[in-house]
Amino acid sequence: MALADGLELDLVEISPNAVPPVCKIVDYSKFVYEQKKKQKEIKANAKQTVIKEIRFGPNTSDHDFQFKLKHAISFLENGEKVRAYVHFKGRAIVYKEHGEILLLKFAQALEEVGKVELLPKLEGKRMFLTVAPKVAKK
């Protein structure tokens, strides 16, 4: 403390849980500024997970399915997650099996580029399937 006062600086406790506790003699305001700067840099470098949604109807034609499949493949190759869902309108909810078959076919087509995180699950009038990109092997 006396040494810090003599240099007109502050005694900052760096690691309080260590035995003995680690302290440093620095300018406290500069120390706080550096800490905030480090935190900001870490936050900037953190990757945001992006979820792209693809919507199907229970009776989606084969051409539309292939078109949406191409988009899903490009999303997964870019490292984004894909959430595919079948939206049931009106009395179409009666054909839940059509939606589930469609989503399972979609998941099977994406096996090379992605892995299924969440199997088809019905929530209200929508049946969801989530696919994440496969991690590239180094």
Image: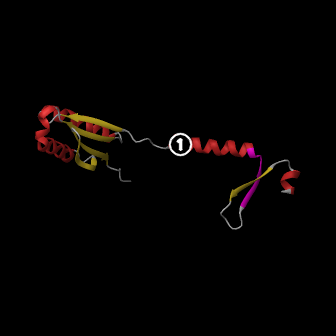
Count the numbered circles shown.
1
The quarter of the displayed image where residue 29 is located: top right
Q: Residue at x 28, y 40 (%)?
A: 83
Q: Residue at x 61, y 45 (%)?
A: 38
| Position of 84 relative to 115 (above/below) | above
Closer to the camera in the image, 71 or 90: 90
Main secondary-structure element of the magenta-colored stretch = strand
Residues rendered magenta in the picture = 22-28
Q: Residue furthest bottom?
A: 19
Label 1, on which residue?
43
Tell me if residue 25 is in the magenta stretch. Answer: yes
| Image coordinates for residue 8, horizontal then vertical, percent | 85, 47
| Position of 76 relative to 137 (above/below) | above
| Image coordinates for residue 136, horizontal then vertical, percent | 35, 50
The quarter of the displayed image where residue 60 is located: top left
| Image coordinates for residue 62, horizontal then vertical, percent | 12, 35
| Image coordinates for residue 9, horizontal then vertical, percent | 82, 48
Q: Amino acid at mark 1?
A: Lys
Closer to the camera in the image, 75 or 131: 131
